[in-house]
Amino acid sequence: MSRHQLVDTIEGVLRSYRFVQEFLFNRQPPAFAMLTLLLDAPNFQLPTLGFRESVLAETARLTEAVGNGDVLRRDEQLRVYRRVLYQARSNDLLIDDSEAAILGVLRQELGVAQVDHFLIEHHADLCEFWQGSGAFERELHSLTSAGLIFTRGDSVVFPEDLAAVVRQVLGIDMSRSAARRLLGYLSVAELRDALELIGAPTSGSKDERIERLIAHMTQPRAILGNVGLDTLRSVCRDIGAPVSGSKESLVDRIIAHVRADRDLAPEPEPPPPPTLEPRRLDVLRFGLLLGSFRGLQLAAILGALDLRRYGTKDLQIQIMWEAHRSESTLLGYLSNLELEAALRRLNLKASGSKKERIERLVEYFAAVQVNDVPSVDASGGGDTE
């Protein structure tokens, strides 16, 4: 490979959801504190001086909060998950693909949120795997080696273009300041109900209840999922977002609106009608082209376009078709490595620039007879989580 191709491939891997997910699930405290502090910091950077102390203090706070039940009070619900995680760590400290799959099923069946996984790592049962004098240095080295943290001058910096995917992997909807603003739109009674659901004390003022939910790292999406449709529409009106749609659509819209700080800006002028990009494939061949990629890859494309990315592959492809984006635009959000893999599955020439690879895929599906498309194994199809 040329230097340009090699750099492009490495960057595509490091910024892919799959890599970030596998990498972060094998990190241990205090990596979680490093990432959450930087994600909450202005311009995603903090001074190098005092960074170590801030990270260790936040790690100690979370360890104490998990230990005394201030966070993750649902011990009966989480004990099984914690025992499986302990067993996975005790083998060689790393969580392999099969262990990650088992943990994923457990989270779904037990109602364990994604962020809960990283909080459980702070539990006393698991501290033996990471506590020690070199924990900070080890995790910092791992994060910098993977390009998730950089030291620039006298600052520790998190790359802004990775904020969305890292938040998704950590199970964090938005920054703490944005979450505070969003929760402020709910009533005292709704905040009380949210605290009751996580087993936390429900008394106090509205601000105290909000801070308690923030301290428990209860994600706004989970809270909004338990409030009424009228409340969601009221929040949409308050933040200047459209009020039509299903409950799920309203929750998605509120999260995206507040996460992007659009609730802080004055209501913008209505945007001009979107440009309809010309496409070369009919709806059937368009579906075959996109269907040759994994569900997580389709989710990444939808996420880049700020469209709903969850659901079956058929639903994901339908959303892309209705977005009126060209095949080249959509495939352009994938990495060279992902395009190369798709070409190889179709027994097509895999080398060349990104533009050439995309063109080759589109040409193939434009010319192919629908019944002659070979069966390809894109692994990872079906529903995305």
Image (tube, rainbow, N blue to C red):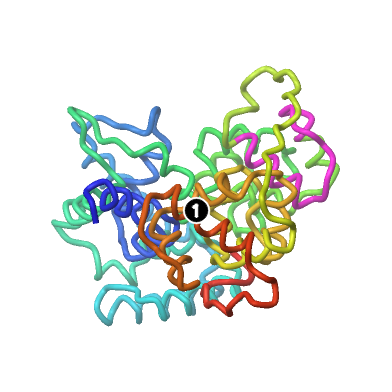
Residue 60 visible from this viewpoint: no
Residue 214 in the image: state x and y as whole percent. 53, 44
- Reading the image, the residue beneath label 1 is 358
Which residue is found at the position 23% from the left and 51% from the top? 2
Picture quadrant of residue 118: bottom left
Residue 255 part of the magenta segment: yes
Picture quadrant of residue 96: bottom left
Give, as a three-letter code, the residue at label 1: Ile
Q: Which residues are magenta?
A: 236-258
Q: Is residue 50 above or below residue 371?
A: above
Residue toward you, 111 or 199: 111
Q: Secondary structure at mark 1?
A: helix
Residue 256 in the image: state x and y as whole percent. 63, 40
Residue 29 part of the magenta segment: no
Which residue is found at the position 39% from the left and 28% from the top? 43
Residue 309 in the image: state x and y as whole percent. 63, 54
Relative placement, left or right, of 51 versus 244 is: left
Which residue is found at the position 76% from the left and 22% from the top? 270
Quadrant in the picture for the C terminus: bottom right
